[in-house]
Image: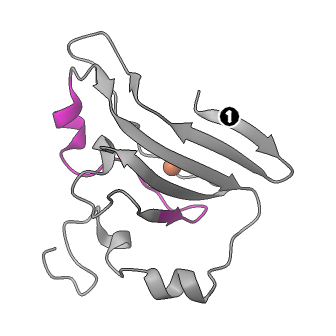
């Protein structure tokens, strides 16, 4: 439902402000998943990305989920989303069907903490 373009070896998806559900006990944040066929790059360009609240993701952030890396909402996001009817988020996602390499710019901007954002601990094992 998010895919807007498809090319040779990639797709582009948009996450835009939208009605997400009607039931008062619905859980509208996405489920955990692991893309075995693609790397996933997201650019968070506006709004409030509910599922990643607490991860360090904010407007202007870029995340990379390499193929096989299980990812999903932050701890507590499922509970906070129960009954939510609207998400005010704006992000663009590119899924590539061949692995991406990180260039100097990507390596230089890695905060070193993102991969640990689901664990409740930092990269050194300390509490984040
Ligand atoms: Fe994903």
Q: Image quarter for residue 115?
A: bottom left
Name the outermost residue toward the right: 8
Asked if residue 75 is positioned above or below residue 63 in the image, the reply reads above
Residue at image point 36% right, 82% down:
112
Asked if residue 58 is positioned above or below residue 92 in the image, the reply reads below
Asked if residue 12 is positioned above or below residue 125 in the image, the reply reads above
Residue at image point 43% right, 42% down:
90
Give the residues drawn in magenta, as a range: 63-82
Q: Image quarter for residue 13?
A: top right
Pointer 1: what residue?
4
Q: Position of residue 93 (x, y in %)?
A: 57, 50
Q: Position of residue 86 (x, y in %)?
A: 31, 23
Inspect the magenta stretch and tell me whether residue 73 lies in it.
yes
* 88 with respect to 82 (left or right): right
Residue at image point 78% right, 41% down:
6
Q: Image quarter for residue 102?
A: bottom right
Q: Quadrant of the N terminus?
A: top right
Residue at image point 25% right, 65% down:
119
Would residue 51 be visible to someone looking at this image?
yes
Q: Residues within 10 Å of mark 1 (few under 14, many from 20)?
A: few
Q: Predominant secondary structure in magenta?
A: loop
Residue nearer the viewer, 53 or 32: 53
Inspect the magenta stretch and tell me whether residue 8 lies in it.
no
* 89 with respect to 63 (left or right): left
Q: Secondary structure at mark 1?
A: strand
Would residue 37 be visible to someone looking at this image?
no
């Amino acid at each position: 439902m998010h895919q807007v373009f498809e090319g040779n070896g990639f797709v582009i998806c948009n996450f835009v402000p939208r009605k997400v559900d009607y039931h008062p006990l619905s859980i509208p944040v996405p489920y955990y998943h692991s893309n075995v066929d693609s790397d996933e790059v997201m650019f968070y360009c506006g709004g409030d990305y509910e599922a990643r609240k607490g991860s360090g993701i904010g407007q202007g952030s870029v995340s990379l989920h390499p193929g096989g890396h299980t990812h999903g909402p932050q701890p507590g996001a499922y509970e906070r989303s129960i009954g939510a009817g609207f998400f005010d988020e704006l992000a663009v996602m590119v899924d590539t069907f061949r692995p991406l390499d990180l260039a100097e710019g990507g390596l230089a901007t890695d905060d070193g903490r993102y991969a640990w954002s689901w664990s409740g601990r930092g990269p050194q094992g300390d509490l984040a």
